[in-house]
């Protein structure tokens, strides 16, 4: 029996046993992080510099890119460091900080994806009220609410998780500090409070999912009533990428946190975590830019201007 007060560090899950595989994992993680940094960085720069992109949809996309950069920079660098230097340790304080920032950026991303769904709903189903419902002040307030609620959510979970006594060692079955992995180390009778808080948060997020589903039902009904195929194609091109991102993020994240303990395994748990913590930040820029002509044009102009200067 060990107490949390005596733990100075945690042991993260080793991604590979042999040195060759460790270096391969380092190269893969490096490529993924560079792709995420480049893609999201281009979106942020294009939206910030392109005055014609200063619309609610691209404003929220810029905020989403910021959350993607934050989440990828929270989990991947430490995993790269451990693979390169053949170590598994992370300090107690470092683990708490990693859990806080990961929960913060993931919560903000979920809120922003829900807001972006509302943006699509208003633009397609209530276009005449778009300027009123989604003015610059309303957008700023919604974005601020998303970031503030994410901060409180992350602070609450981090404080509650690390207040639990840890009775089962310090080896985490995950490549980064995640709430379910730490709960497995806590005393069973002490983790019920955090489990209840976790279930409450997930139920709240499932309520948002219901809002997303209802909104998209209304969106698809409105799109199918558009007489021209070109109009339908344009509407679907802005909605389907967002729906794909929401589906991947929510399904993998919810299953990772709610799956029964009997389904946990050293290979399944990290794979699920990669699907909702690493894949979306990397694919989001690609999904959104490929389906949006305005964004592609702005990114192309930005890169052309940069090449001319260098």
Image (cartoon, helix red, strand yellow):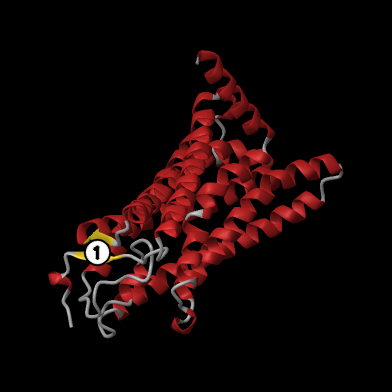
Res 143 quadrant in image:
top left
Work out whether 170 lies above or below 209: below
Q: Nearer the viewer, residue 22 or 15?
A: 22
Q: Residue furthest top?
A: 309
Q: Nearer the viewer, residue 101 or 137?
A: 101
Res 305 quadrant in image:
top right
Q: Which quadrant is the N terminus positioned in? A: bottom left
- Visible residue check, residue 207: no
Question: Which residue is drawn at the image coordinates 60% and 60% (left, top)?
Answer: 247
Q: Where does residue 65 sit, x and y in percent of width and height?
A: 49, 42
Work out whether 109 lies above or below 181: above
Please tell me how crowded label 1 is: few (under 14), some (14-19), or many (20+) other residues with Cα within 10 Å: few
Q: Where does residue 78 sit, x and y in percent of width and height?
A: 34, 53
Tag 1's secondary structure?
helix
Question: Which residue is drawn at the image coordinates 61% and 43% (left, top)?
Answer: 286
- Visible residue check, residue 3: yes
Q: Where does residue 214 sit, x and y in percent of width and height?
A: 64, 61
Q: Nearer the viewer, residue 93 or 240?
A: 93
The tally of labels here is 1
Question: Which residue is drawn at the image coordinates 44% and 73% (left, top)?
Answer: 266
Work out whether 249 lies above or below 303: below
Res 19 quadrant in image:
bottom left
In the image, taking residue 24 as reference, residue 151 lies left or right, namely: left
* Residue under pointer 1: 159
Q: Residue furthest left?
A: 6
Work out whether 43 lies above or below 197: above
Question: Which residue is drawn at the image coordinates 36% and 52% (left, top)?
Answer: 84
Q: Where does residue 267 sit, x and y in percent of width and height?
A: 48, 71
């Amino acid at each position: 029996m060990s107490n949390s007060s005596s733990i100075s560090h945690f042991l993260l899950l080793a991604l590979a046993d042999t040195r060759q595989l460790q270096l391969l994992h380092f190269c893969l993680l490096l490529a993924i992080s560079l792709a995420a940094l480049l893609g999201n960085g281009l979106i942020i720069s294009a939206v910030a510099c392109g005055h014609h992109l200063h619309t609610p949809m691209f404003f929220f996309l810029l905020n989403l890119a910021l959350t993607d950069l934050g989440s990828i920079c929270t989990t991947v660098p430490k995993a790269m460091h451990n693979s390169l230097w053949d170590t598994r340790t992370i300090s107690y304080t470092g683990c708490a900080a990693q859990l806080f920032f990961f929960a913060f950026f993931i919560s903000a991303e979920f809120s922003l994806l829900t807001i972006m769904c509302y943006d699509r709903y208003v633009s397609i189903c209530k276009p005449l009220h778009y300027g009123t419902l989604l003015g610059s002040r309303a957008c700023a307030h919604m974005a601020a609410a998303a970031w503030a609620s994410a901060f409180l959510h992350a602070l609450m979970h981090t404080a509650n998780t690390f207040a639990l006594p840890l009775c089962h060692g310090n080896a985490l079955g995950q490549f980064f500090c995640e709430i379910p992995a730490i709960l497995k180390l806590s005393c069973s009778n002490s983790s019920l409070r955090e489990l209840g808080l976790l279930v409450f948060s997930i139920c709240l997020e499932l309520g948002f999912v219901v809002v997303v589903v209802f909104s998209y039902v209304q969106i698809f009904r409105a799109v199918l009533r558009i007489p021209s195929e070109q109009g339908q194609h344009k509407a679907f091109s802005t909605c389907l990428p967002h729906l794909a991102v929401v589906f991947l993020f929510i399904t993998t994240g919810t299953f990772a946190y709610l799956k029964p303990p009997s389904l946990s395994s050293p290979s399944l748990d990290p794979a699920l975590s990669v699907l909702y913590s690493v894949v979306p930040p990397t694919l989001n820029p690609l999904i959104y830019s490929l389906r949006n002509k305005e964004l592609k044009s702005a990114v192309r102009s930005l890169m052309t201007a940069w090449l001319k200067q260098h």
